[in-house]
Image: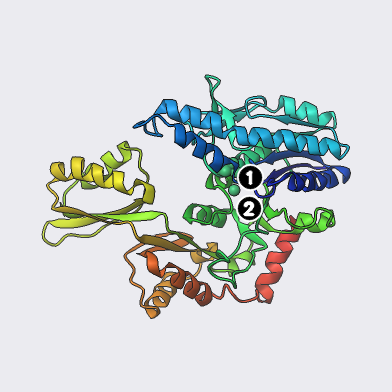
Amino acid sequence: MALIVHKYGGTSMGSTERIRSVAQRVAKWVRAGHQLVVVPSAMSGETNRLLGLAKELLPAGAQASSPDALRELDAIAATGEQVSVGLLALALQAQGLQAVSYGGWQVPIRTDSSFTKARITSIEETRVRADLAAGKVVVITGFQGIDEAGNVTTLGRGGSDTSAVAVAAALKADECLIYTDVDGVYTTDPRIVPEARRLTSISFEEMLEMASLGSKVLQIRSVEFAGKYRVPLRVLSSFTPWDIALDEEARSGTLITFEEDEKMEQAVVAGIAFNRDEAKISVIGVPDKPGIAFQILGPVADANIDIDVIIQNMSHSGRTDFSFTVHRNDYVRTMEVLKTQVLPALGAADVQGDPKICKVSIVGIGMRSHVGVASKMFRTLSEEAINIQMITTSEIKTSVVIDEKYMELAVRALHKAFDLDQPVTLGMASAAESDAQAG
Ligand code: ASP
Ligand code: MG
């Protein structure tokens, strides 16, 4: 008997018919002797619908960022998951199981008070444990929690992944299965590269990079959580027939693994991520002296704007250019901060921006032990005549910022150059396959 957490995404919960098939799948696991906690998202489209309604009624001129408004946005958005858990518990009962649903506040799942992007601080497991011991399936809302003052909070879009992993960590579950509308983690987005392959396993560190670089399969915080508490995590499809053999289901999808054995390292590049949500900003003609980066980025950070890639060149004439990227949604605000606060104080010549850029990254733990990976990336892009505007690297990834219009071309060319479209050759395949099976 194992304690298993299942998470079902919005599409998997998209209709009463689908919820019934989720219940059938869960029932299969329970009948095989496992204890189940299930964390569903809101029905697909529901969170958007709720937030759309909220937007219509935001007081005129009010920022959706005022703390009072944000509190209400969370109160509204959290109802999507509230409905899901009740429906799923009913569907489970209809399967002849004992099932009980809880909102985040009932467990409780405690968070800080950062409305719309709260962080989980603790989860009380007593109630859930008692239910499990009594033979019940426990259904817990994704996405939401409760702060110290008793306010309902949400964890940010896609936050149900994080709820599920956090619940699994708190209960020390044997595995957390993330059921979604794709059948695993791919070498890149198959909508851009039809030859993209599903990975049978990926290391936790690679997954962390993929998630932070734009792969939308898992919310990044869920991967961070899984890493911190070493929660065994698997991404798999909820669209296989619910009655496929449990063994087969338990081995399907992509396992996120913590073991970096030698065989896995043979895959130098595991995948290609991309992100078109960024914008580039350059402050031109900055004096080259101590404190400049802080003077430029301090006010940006104070405005609560996240900065991603940063580049500062050497100066020859005592002046230099300073470039960085931010989320595209923050572009206008960042330009404003720079023009009103930074330029006058700095005496920099100008600020220029380009919201039409994208970031393309290659990711792989094999990059640690292989040389020439980044240069192969640059050669590939140069052969396609794609100009690289910025470069940033870490131990296991290389990212480039390029013109947005070349994104698909770059991703396709790199996917091919690193042989990610090839059916895995013997050494790698067997390693990946056996990893998955061992899990
Ligand atoms: N329902 C929430 C959203 O759409 C949370 C989730 O689905 O993970 O973002
Ligand atoms: Mg999701």
| Mark 2, other Cα within 10 Å: few <14 / some 14–19 / many ≥20 | some
Question: Measured along the vertical axis of the image, is residue 241 above or below residue 115?
Answer: below
The residue carrying mark 1 is: 230
Q: Is residue 260 visible?
A: no
Q: Is mark 2 within 8 Å of ligand 2?
A: no
**Contact, mark 2 vs mark 1 (Cβ under 8 Å):** yes
**Near-viewer residue (160 or 289):** 160
Q: In which quadrant will I find the N terminus? A: top right
Q: Is residue 317 visible?
A: yes
* Corner quadrant of residue 121: top right
- Count up the numbered dots: 2
Colour setup of the view: rainbow
- Helix, strand or loop under label 2: loop
Question: Measured along the vertical axis of the image, is residue 325 above or below residue 123?
Answer: below
**Near-viewer residue (264 or 192):** 192
* Three-letter code for the amino acid on which mark 2 is drawn: Phe
Q: Is mark 1 within 8 Å of ligand 2?
A: no
- Ligand 1, seen in the image, is in the quarter at top right
Could you say where residue 439 lies in the image, as x and y percent from the top left? 74, 55
Residue farthest to the top, as pictured: 149
Could you say where residue 321 lies in the image, as x and y percent from the top left? 20, 57
35 sits to left or right of 269: right
160 sits to left or right of 177: left
| Mark 1, other Cα within 10 Å: few <14 / some 14–19 / many ≥20 | some
**What numbered label is drawn on residue 258?**
2
